[in-house]
Amino acid sequence: MGWSLHSVTLEQAAEQGLVEKINRKRGGALGRKFGLEIKDLESPNPELRKAWLQRIRAECLDEAQWLQEYCCTPAEDSRPSSLSKCWLAARTPNSN
């Protein structure tokens, strides 16, 4: 059986309710952090989603980091990182 790639961008996760789930878990603290007084913690809140995504994006060093880390877009430099080289080495059977 083969494999298949499944990916979800941060924006898709926000659209699916991730931000509201975080806010609910924190008792509304996330909304207050952005100056929003949210009374209904169960309903979708586009304003909270927008503020949260803007904050995450502002914390990125550059557009390339945003695209790679949060938008499932590979970097232009597609050489394997040190971590993936180690992982590949560990997964490769010993040919001795």
Image (tube, rainbow, N blue to C red):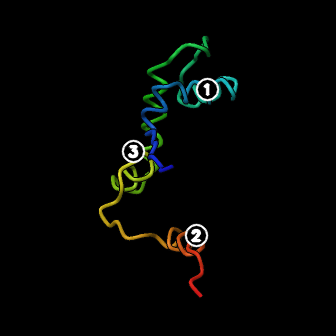
Q: How far apart are marks 1 and 3 (CA)?
A: 20 Å
Depth check, front residue: 75 or 66: 75
Q: Is residue 33 above or below residue 96?
A: above
Q: In the rendering, which numbered label is found on residue 71? A: 3
* Residue sitting farthest toward the left: 76
Q: Where is residue 47 in the image (x, y as percent from the top left)?
A: 45, 22
Query: Mark 2–mark 1 contact, CB under 8 Å?
Result: no
Q: How far apart are marks 2 and 1 (CA)?
A: 36 Å
* Three-letter amino acid code at the position of disc 1: Lys
Q: Residues within 10 Å of mark 3 (few under 14, many from 20)?
A: some
Q: What kind of element bears circle 2?
A: helix
Question: Which residue is at 42% across, 70% downward?
Answer: 80
Q: Which of marks 3 and 2 is nearer the N terminus?
A: 3
* Three-letter amino acid code at the position of disc 3: Cys
Q: Position of residue 61 (x, y in %)?
A: 41, 57
| Number of the front mark, 2 or 1 | 2
Disc 2 target residue: 91
Q: Is residue 8 above or below residue 94?
A: above
Considering the image in quadrants, where does the C terminus appear?
Answer: bottom right
Q: Residues within 10 Å of mark 1 (few under 14, many from 20)?
A: some
* Three-letter amino acid code at the position of disc 2: Arg
Disc 1 target residue: 21
In-image side of 96 versus 65 (left or right): right
Depth check, front residue: 35 or 53: 53
Q: How far apart are marks 3 and 2 (CA)?
A: 27 Å
Q: Is residue 33 above or below residue 64?
A: above
